Image (tube, rainbow, N blue to C red):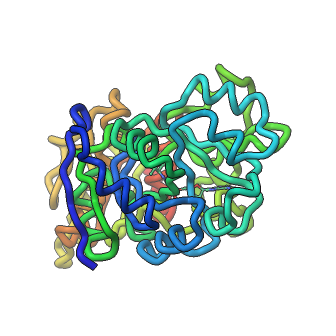
C-alpha cells in the first residue's frame, strides 16, 4: 500500500486541506494524525471492518480496546449508557484535552472497538487537526497511538512514518505534538472513579473536580507482579520499549552519576553501544557513550515531551544498553515514571 503523507500547519488549516483524509475515514480507511498527546492511528470506530484494519496495521492484540475520539459533548448520549454526572463534570473541566474516560457503552459501539468489553473509552482531543478531522468528517474516530504495538508512542510525524509507512492510507504531518505522553485514563463506571493510566491530567487535578479517586494497583506497581492485572488491557503488554536494555538508577545524584558512568563504561569496554539519558543538571557529569539531555528536573513538561523521541533515537543508533536517572513520582512525574518503568521492563537499580 502506498501511504500518502501530507503536511498541515495546525495553526493555519487551509480550507479543503483535510478533504482527502475525511473521505478516507468516511470510507473505512486508515489515517494517522497528530493529537496534543501523541500521534493517533484513526479509523471509523463504529465500523467493524475499519477498526479491524487498525489492529492489523499495528500488530495489536485484539483484546486491547480502542479510544473513540469525539468533537461534541452530544456524542456522549449516543455512545454511552447511563453516563454518570461526574462524566459531565470531568468533561467540562478537561475537554477538549488529554483525558480519556471509560463509560458503559451503548449498543451503537461495536465490540470490535472495545475488545469485547461492555465499556468504551472516549476522549475529546484539543489538537486543531484532530478536532477538525472529527468535526468535519462526523466520524467517531477510533485511534490508538500510531506506533507498531510495543514500540514507544509517536510524538513526531517521522516516528509514524518509521512504523506505518506502507501499512496505512495516509499520514498527516502536523509537526511535533506538545505533551508527548498518552492521555490520562479514568474509569468512571464504578462507585469510585479509578485512574487506569497516569498522564498530563494528574490525580490531584482530577480530585480537585470530583473528590477522592482510586488508582489502579498496576499503576502503582514498581516491580513486575504477575498477580496484578491492569484494568486497562493495554497496560499489561510490554510497551514503550526501546530495543536496547534500559535501566533506571535511583538514589542521590552523585551515587547515580557514578553508578551510571561505571556500568556504562564496563559495557562499552566489552564492545557494546551505550547511551545515557541525562538531565540539564547532570549532563556534564557523564563521560561515556552517547549522552542525551531530556530537560531540567524542574521542567517535567519538557521531560515528558522528549521521552519517547529519545528512546526511539537510541533505537535508530543501535544502542544496546541505555541508562537513565529516575524522576519524582508525583504529579506529571507519575506518568513519566510509569512509562519509563514499563520501557525498562521494571529494570531499576537503587544506589
Ligand atoms: O493520548 C491518547 O490516549 C492517544 C491519542 C491518540 O488519543 N491514544 C492512545 O491509545 O494512547 P492506545 O490505544 O495506545 O491506548 C489506549 C489505552 C489502552 O491501554 C487500552 O487498553 C485502554 O486505553 N482502554 C481502551 N478502552 C478501554 C476500556 N473500555 N476499559 C479499560 N481500558 C481501556
Ligand atoms: Mg498505545
**Image quadrant containing the N terminus:** bottom left
Tell me residue 10's x, y (percent): 26, 37
- For residue 312, side relative to residue 63 (left or right): left
Q: How many marks overall? A: 0
The quadrant in which residue 212 appears is top right
Q: Nearer the viewer, residue 293 or 116?
A: 116
Which one is nearer the viewer's eye here, 133 or 155?
Answer: 133
Please give the name of the residue rendered at 73% of the width and 63% of the height, measured from the top-left corner.
Answer: 117
State the image coordinates of residue 229 (x, y, percent, origin top left). 71, 63
Name the residue at the right extreme: 191
The reply, left or right, for residue 179 in relation to residue 60 is left
**Residue 55: % across, % down:** 50, 73
The residue shown at (65%, 57%) is 232
Q: Nearer the viewer, residue 229 or 114?
A: 114
Displayed quadrant of residue 111: bottom right
Does residue 259 appear anywhere in the picture? no
Residue 76 is situated, as x and y percent measured from the top left of the image, at 67, 40
Image height of 92 relative to 281, above or below: above
Left or right placement of residue 55 versus residue 281 in this view: right
Residue located 35% across and 45% down the image? 255
| Residue 330, above or below 205 | below
Residue 157, above or below 295: below
In this orientation, does residue 149 appear? yes
Amino acid at each position: 500500500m502506498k501511504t500518502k503523507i501530507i503536511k498541515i500547519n495546525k495553526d493555519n488549516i487551509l480550507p479543503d486541506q483535510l478533504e482527502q483524509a475525511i473521505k478516507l475515514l468516511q470510507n473505512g480507511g486508515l489515517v494517522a494524525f497528530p493529537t496534543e498527546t501523541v500521534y493517533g492511528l484513526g479509523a471509523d470506530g463504529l465500523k467493524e471492518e475499519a477498526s479491524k484494519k487498525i489492529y492489523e496495521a499495528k500488530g495489536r492484540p485484539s483484546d486491547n480496546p480502542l479510544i473513540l475520539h469525539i468533537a461534541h459533548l452530544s456524542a456522549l448520549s449516543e455512545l454511552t449508557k447511563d453516563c454518570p454526572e461526574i462524566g459531565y463534570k470531568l468533561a467540562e473541566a478537561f475537554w477538549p484535552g488529554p483525558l480519556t474516560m471509560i463509560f458503559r457503552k451503548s449498543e451503537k459501539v461495536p465490540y470490535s472497538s472495545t475488545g469485547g468489553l461492555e465499556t468504551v473509552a472516549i476522549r475529546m482531543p484539543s489538537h486543531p487537526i484532530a478536532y477538525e478531522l472529527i468535526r468535519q468528517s462526523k466520524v467517531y474516530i477510533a485511534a490508538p497511538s500510531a506506533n507498531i504495538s510495543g514500540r514507544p508512542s509517536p510524538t513526531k510525524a517521522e516516528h509514524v512514518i518509521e512504523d506505518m509507512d506502507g501499512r496505512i492510507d495516509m499520514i498527516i504531518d502536523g509537526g511535533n505534538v506538545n505533551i508527548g505522553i498518552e492521555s490520562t485514563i479514568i474509569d468512571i463506571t464504578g462507585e469510585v472513579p479509578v485512574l487506569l493510566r497516569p498522564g498530563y491530567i494528574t490525580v490531584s487535578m482530577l480530585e480537585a473536580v470530583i473528590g477522592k479517586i482510586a488508582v489502579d494497583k498496576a499503576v502503582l506497581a514498581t516491580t513486575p507482579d504477575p498477580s496484578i492485572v491492569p484494568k486497562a488491557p493495554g497496560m499489561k503488554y510490554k510497551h514503550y520499549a526501546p530495543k536496547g536494555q534500559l535501566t533506571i538508577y535511583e538514589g542521590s545524584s552523585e551515587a547515580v552519576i557514578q553508578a551510571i558512568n561505571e556500568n556504562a563504561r564496563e559495557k562499552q569496554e566489552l564492545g557494546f553501544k551505550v547511551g545515557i539519558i541525562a538531565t540539564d543538571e547532570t549532563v556534564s557529569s557523564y563521560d561515556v557513550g552517547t549522552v542525551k539531555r531530556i530537560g531540567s528536573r524542574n521542567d517535567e513538561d519538557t521531560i515528558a515531551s522528549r521521552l519517547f523521541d529519545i528512546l526511539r533515537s537510541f533505537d535508530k543508533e543501535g544502542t544496546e544498553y541505555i541508562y537513565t536517572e529516575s524522576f519524582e513520582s508525583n504529579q506529571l512525574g507519575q506518568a513519566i515514571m510509569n512509562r519509563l518503568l514499563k520501557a525498562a521492563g521494571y529494570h531499576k537499580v537503587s544506589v
